[in-house]
Image (cartoon, rainbow, N blue to C red):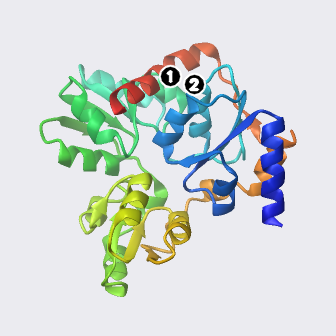
Amino acid sequence: MITDIQKEIDRLKKSTDTCILAHSYMSEDICEAADFCGDSYALAVKAKNVSQSNVIVCGVRFMAETVKMLSPSKRVILANPQAGCPMAEQFNVEEIEKLKRQNAGCAVVAYVNTTAKLKTIADVCVTSSSAVKICSALPQKDILFIPDINLGTYVKNLLPEKNFILVDGGCPAHAKITRADAENAKRAYPQALMLVHPECRPEVTALADYVGSTAGIMQFAEKSNKRQFIIGTENSIVQHLQFRCPDKKFYPLSKDLLCGNMRITTLYDVFDCLNGDGGEEIVMPEELRVRAVRSIEKMIEYGG
């Protein structure tokens, strides 16, 4: 049944000139049906270069907004309109502008997990895979990093030559993982390496054998000659790695490392979008798009 739907999706996307972009946190059946699957940075770069006139984004709202910013002439559909991002919505423009005034001369660095409105006041966006490289390359010494305090702390510790101003925001799913969770996982699987996303708390990343983006975690596990791994990011990655590396063992750091917003999108949502019976078209005022896309373009310029 799943294979039948995937075949019909493949037929429909060709007949409707549609490209499907899926975040790595999507389920395996969606990733198989997608034209491209990757983390938020990879999706942002790919979005700029796809040739199709229609794009379905299987992810959360800020990702679909980013695609629209980079491809304004394309019709961009968010596969499930309910898929938001709590981190992206934690701060508003007024709050960050006040902090910017209080720290005159600082560069505002926004994690890509932010709304389009917040991106309008950022100097550059970053992702977990590009944050260290981009912050290091900025000419400003003082950096106001929004909204993830955990990712900001991770970057700050690697760049002691910079002065970071952090705000108390972050990913609810990653931030709720504790040191005790990490210690319990290491006791349960003593032979396994622990691979952790920098959205986790510093006391969790301190116990990790590797800290990196979703793509980085997957690449590390695939290339490593080790056979067992504890995965400290959204639990969908455990399943993806099990398919990619059937000769290795993968364990979730915590059964609670789940993103409901990512999990809400289904293969049928994609099917309905292609039939014109689902999803939500992303419509963005041109003035907002122009102001917001500058920080994304700077991210691609600095990030390579």
> In the visual, does 19 lie left or right of 262?
right
Residue type of the residue flagged with mark 1:
Val
- Label 2 vs label 1: CA separation? 5 Å
193 or 187: nearer the viewer: 193
Instruction: Check the picture and name the quadrant holding the N terminus.
Output: bottom right
The percent position of residue 263, horizontal first and vertical second, equals 64, 59
Q: Residue at x 25, y 69 (%)?
A: 207
The percent position of residue 161, horizontal first and vertical second, equals 12, 36
Vertical position of residue 234 compared to residue 21: above or below: below
Q: Which residue is mark 2?
A: 69
| Location of residue 130 by image quarter | top left
Circle nearer the N terminus (2, 1):
2
Of helix, strand and loop, which one carries label 2? helix
Residue type of the residue flagged with mark 2:
Met
The percent position of residue 96, horizontal first and vertical second, equals 39, 29
CB under 8 Å between callouts 2 and 1? yes
Is residue 46 in view? yes
| Location of residue 214 by image quarter | bottom left
| Location of residue 66 by image quarter | top right
226 or 154: nearer the viewer: 226
The percent position of residue 78, horizontal first and vertical second, equals 69, 40
Decide: few, some or many residues near mark 2? Use Cα within 10 Å; few <14, some 14-19, many ≥20. Answer: many
Q: Which residue is mark 1?
A: 293
Q: Residue at x 42, y 68 (%)?
A: 231
Instruction: Check the picture and name the quadrant holding the C terminus.
Output: top left
Is residue 88 in view? no
